[in-house]
Structure formats: structure tokens, C-alpha cells
Amino acid sequence: MIPAQAPVAQQPSWQLAAQRRASFGTLLAVEVRKMTATVADKILVIAGPLVLLMADLLFLSGSSQTLTTEDQLTPVFASIRIAPVLMNVVLVKLIAAEWHYRSAQPTLLAQPSRLRYVLAQATVAAATWLVIFGLQALLVFGHFRHRLDTLGVDFLLAYRPGAMVAAVALGTFAVTLAAVTIGWLIPNTAGAITAYLLVLLVFLFLQTGNDLAGWLDPVEAARQLSSIAEHGPLALATSLLLWLGLAGSGIRQAGTREAA
């Protein structure tokens, strides 16, 4: 007589779901929820674009003295550095706080791939950059142009529209990349935000109206594209190597850092 086999216990649905690898869309949704997790986070996210608009309106108010291309590009690059500060602080806070408060643990338990985790953060940062670039380009080529037309000053950036739009895109991207890189490198919320603000203010002081630190400036590529940089290809190479190297180092650290 063949003994009856014991019935195989079925795993509960929650356990089966937990064993599945989380989709990339799920990772993105998790990062967005972390960005707006608290009331303070929601206020920062909402205030970021408003601060960008107000800062741009201040910097790009126009003047009868903006008679040269460099005169007109100076407030543009100042606004590129300063206007998106709150939106980039949100990104720094999102990335650094993942390790500071150990909120990376549940994400890595749901899917252990560090590369997908970093890619999800980079995707959120890229979406934020697109918003920054869109608003910045709209205000430079809309509001700023209208203000100069009102003052009877020729809008010189319109003579090279492709290069100027590319310079705004590259400049805003470089500032966002610097913020994300600092977030990856410094796993401490307050420390990362402080470092980002210091970098922002130092280069704003050194590079607005002058070109004293083009060798290290994250926005050097955009400045050279717009033809207002005083340094040549060597400064471009050193700034690119510096910030791309730091970004690579930050990604490597995020891929190996202990989450416990």
C-alpha cells in the first residue's frame, strides 16, 4: 500500500509578491514617494519651482546697461546657479537621507541591485533637471527678452539661439549633476546640503562677472559654449574630468556602501 503524500503547503500571496523582483517603475514610484514623504518635504517640492521663478524674475529683470552679449549672459548664468537651489536641495536631501536615515534598507531588500537603485535616483534627478531647464529657458527667452525689448535693448542671445539654448541646458544639467554627486558622496543630509550650498556660493562669487575658477567650475562647459569663458580647452578638460570623476566616484560609493 502506497502511503498518501502530505499536501504541499501553498505560500501566501504576500510572500510570493515579496519574492518577486521589484520593477523599475516601482523603484521610481518609491523614490518619488520618499521625495514627498513628510509635510516639510511636500512644502520643499512645491516651493522649489516657485523659488526658481522668483529668483529668475529678480536676476533677469533687465537693464539698459546690458548692451553686450557678455552683459546679457552674466545674469543668465547667475540665475542658472542660484534659481534652482531649492529643487536641487530636494535631490541632495533625497539621496543623502537614504543612507543617513537608513531608508535605503527596505528598497534594497525589495530588490538588491545597487545599480538599478542608483539608476532610479538618477532618473528622478533627470526629470527634475528637465523641469529646471524648461522653466529656465522659458524665462530667459521669454521674460528676459521681453524686458530688454521694453528697455529698447537688442536681445543679442537671439542671434545664436541654438548655442544659447544648449548653453542653458548644459549649465542647468551641470548644476543638477553637482547636487546629485554631492548627495552620493556624502551620506549625511546636513553635511551634503551644506557642501552643495558652499560649492554653489563659491562658484557664484568667483565666476559672476569674472572667470577666476574656470578650471574647476561645473558650469565651465556651458560658459565656453556661450563664448564668455576666458579659459580654453584645458580648463574645459579639467572641469569635466573633475566633475565626471566625482560623479563616477559617487556612483561607485553608492554601489558599495553598507545599508545597515
Image (cartoon, helix red, strand yellow):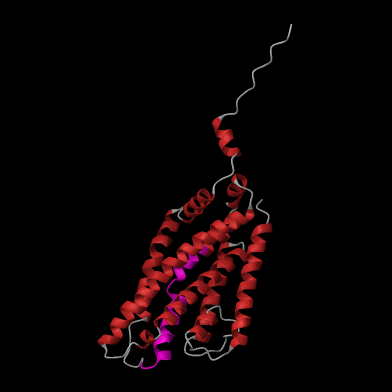
Does 253 sit left or right of 171 as displayed? Answer: right
Pick whichever, 189 or 206, lies toward us. 206
Q: Dividing the picture into quarters, in which one does residue 49 lie?
A: bottom left
Residue 191: % across, % down: 58, 67
Q: Quadrant of the N terminus?
A: top right
Does 224 sit left or right of 235 as displayed? Answer: left
Judge whether 24 appears above or below 227 on screen.
above
Residue 169: % across, % down: 46, 74
Does 230 sit left or right of 6 as displayed? Answer: left
Per the image, is 79 magenta?
yes
Pick whichever, 260 or 66, lies toward us. 66
* Residue at point 56%, 45% (across, down): 22
The magenta-colored residue range is: 67-91
* Residue at point 66%, 58% (across, down): 255
Q: Dividing the picture into quarters, in which one does residue 243 lie?
A: bottom right
* Residue at point 55%, 76% (across, down): 199
Judge whether 137 appears above or below 32 on screen.
below
Give the main secondary structure of the magenta stretch.
helix
Q: Is residue 105 visible?
A: yes
Pick whichever, 62 or 1, lies toward us. 1
Q: Is residue 205 visible?
A: no
Does 141 sit left or right of 125 as displayed? Answer: left
Residue at far top of view: 1
